[in-house]
Amino acid sequence: MSEFIEKIGELNPEALSVDGLDDAIIGFGNQFPKEAVLVYDYSKCVELLMKQNDWDYIDAVEWMEFNVVSAYHGEGTPIFVTCDKQEA
């Protein structure tokens, strides 16, 4: 279990995680006055999906966008950050 998942449980018991993408967690964050949520590296999520499912980049991005990034599950929904300036 990710140390971030353990810590976020203390900060915000309603915070959600994405199954299978623990290695892409880069921390937690919040926007005042909301509670903290997990923060994921978007590129790392795509890499993990490619590896776990033997998908190419396009398939992983499409799945990520439709099934993860676009899925809002309330205040505990994670944040996905693009850290690589070339992807922006």
Image (cartoon, grey):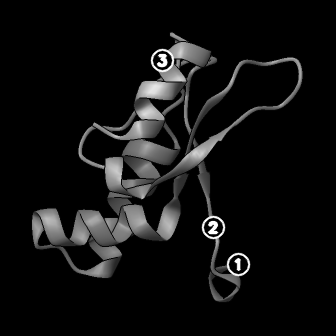
- Name the spot of residue 25 as percent of width and height, x first: 46, 50
Disc 1/disc 2 C-alpha distance (Å)? 7 Å
Which image quarter: residue 86? Answer: bottom right
Disc 3/disc 1 C-alpha distance (Å)? 31 Å
Sort mark 2 into few (<14), some (14-19) or many (20+) by Cα contacts within 10 Å: few
Where residue 88 is drawn, which disc sits there?
1
Q: Is residue 44 left or right of residue 82?
A: left
Q: Which residue is mark 3?
A: 9
Callouts 1 and 2 close, C-beta under 8 Å: yes
Disc 2/disc 3 C-alpha distance (Å)? 24 Å
Q: Which residue is mark 2?
A: 82
Three-letter amino acid code at disc 2? Thr
Task: Single out the mark in the foreground, 3 or 1.
Answer: 3
Three-letter amino acid code at disc 3? Gly
Q: Nearer the viewer, residue 7 or 83?
A: 7
Residue at the location (27% across, 65% down)?
A: 48
The quadrant of the picture occupied by the N terminus is top left
Where residue 73 is drawn, which disc sits there?
none
Mark 3 or mark 1, which has the lower sequence index? Answer: 3
- Name the spot of residue 37 as percent of width and height, x first: 61, 30
